[in-house]
Image (cartoon, rainbow, N blue to C red):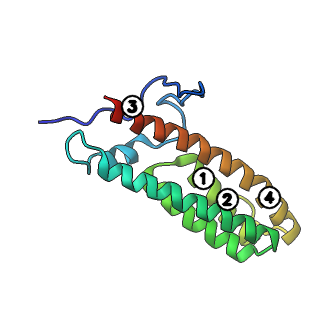
């Protein structure tokens, strides 16, 4: 019975020497990601890789839409986009991105990060502006990790 290799190398460095997070980081929910890997055929990760690569395309497009919505101060659209990317991120186990997108969803609804207290439109825009840069960084961190994960599998 073939076993699926663990998706969590302890320390991998890419060509530009970026450090890939250890399995103990809060970057990825490995239980969720392992469930995705279980859908692959044996050691062939084509299925999960295609889902992850589609996520990358979707996230990049969504970030572009978020930038445009922020430019015109469209809080409703920012909330919807945050909700959308939250779900996609959760599906592949990107915990940091998911959490930030949930906050964006709340801010877009003019609520605090917990979704309970009302904030002003100006506060919401300020918070989203800062958060959008943070979530893009978190996404890049996850993208690097996942691309290195699949590269390691492709090279073996």
Quadrant housing the C terminus: top left
- Mark 3 or 4, which is nearer the eye? 3
Q: Which mark is on residue 152?
A: 3
Q: Earlier in the sequence, mark 1 or mark 4?
A: 1
* SS for callout 2: helix
For label 3, count other residues whose C-alpha is less than 10 Å away and answer few (under 14), some (14-19) or many (20+): some
Judging by the rendered image, the residue that carries numbered circle 1 is 99
* SS for callout 1: helix
Q: Is residue 65 above or below residue 1?
A: below
**In 3D space, how far apart are the residues under numbered discs 1 and 2 (Cα atoms)?**
6 Å
Q: Earlier in the sequence, mark 3 or mark 1?
A: 1
Is the Cβ of the residue at disc 1 closer than 8 Å to that at disc 4?
no
Q: Earlier in the sequence, mark 3 or mark 2?
A: 2
Judging by the rendered image, the residue that carries numbered circle 4 is 129
Please indicate whether residue 112 sits to the left or right of residue 39 in the image.
Answer: right
For label 2, count other residues whose C-alpha is less than 10 Å away and answer few (under 14), some (14-19) or many (20+): many
**In 3D space, how far apart are the residues under numbered discs 3 and 1 (Cα atoms)?**
28 Å
The answer, for residue 115, to whether it is visible in the render is no
**In 3D space, how far apart are the residues under numbered discs 3 and 4 (Cα atoms)?**
35 Å
Is the Cβ of the residue at disc 3 closer than 8 Å to that at disc 1?
no
Q: Earlier in the sequence, mark 2 or mark 4?
A: 2
Q: Residue at x 62, y 58 (%)?
A: 101
Q: Earlier in the sequence, mark 3 or mark 4?
A: 4
**In 3D space, how far apart are the residues under numbered discs 3 and 2 (Cα atoms)?**
33 Å
Please indicate whether residue 35 sits to the left or right of residue 90 in the image.
Answer: left
Q: Residue at x 81, y 69 (%)?
A: 71
- The image position of residue 118, as x and y in percent, is 79, 69
- The image position of residue 127, as x and y in percent, is 80, 58
- The image position of residue 85, as x and y in percent, is 56, 62
Judging by the rendered image, the residue that carries numbered circle 2 is 103
Residue at the far right in the pictured view: 122
């Amino acid at each position: 019975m073939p076993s699926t290799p663990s998706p969590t190398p302890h320390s991998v460095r890419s060509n530009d020497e970026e450090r890939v997070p250890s399995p103990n980081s809060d970057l990825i929910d490995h239980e969720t990601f392992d469930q995705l890997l279980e859908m692959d055929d044996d050691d062939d990760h084509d299925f999960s890789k295609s889902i992850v690569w589609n996520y990358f395309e979707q996230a990049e497009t969504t970030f572009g839409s978020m930038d445009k919505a922020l430019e015109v101060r469209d809080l409703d659209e920012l909330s919807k986009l945050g909700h959308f990317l939250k779900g996609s991120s959760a599906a592949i186990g990107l915990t940091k991105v998911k959490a930030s997108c949930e906050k964006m969803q709340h801010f877009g609804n003019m609520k605090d990060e917990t979704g309970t207290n009302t904030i002003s439109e100006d506060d919401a825009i300020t918070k989203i502006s800062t958060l959008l840069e943070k979530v893009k960084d978190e996404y890049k961190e996850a993208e690097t990790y996942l691309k290195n994960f699949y590269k390691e599998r492709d090279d073996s």
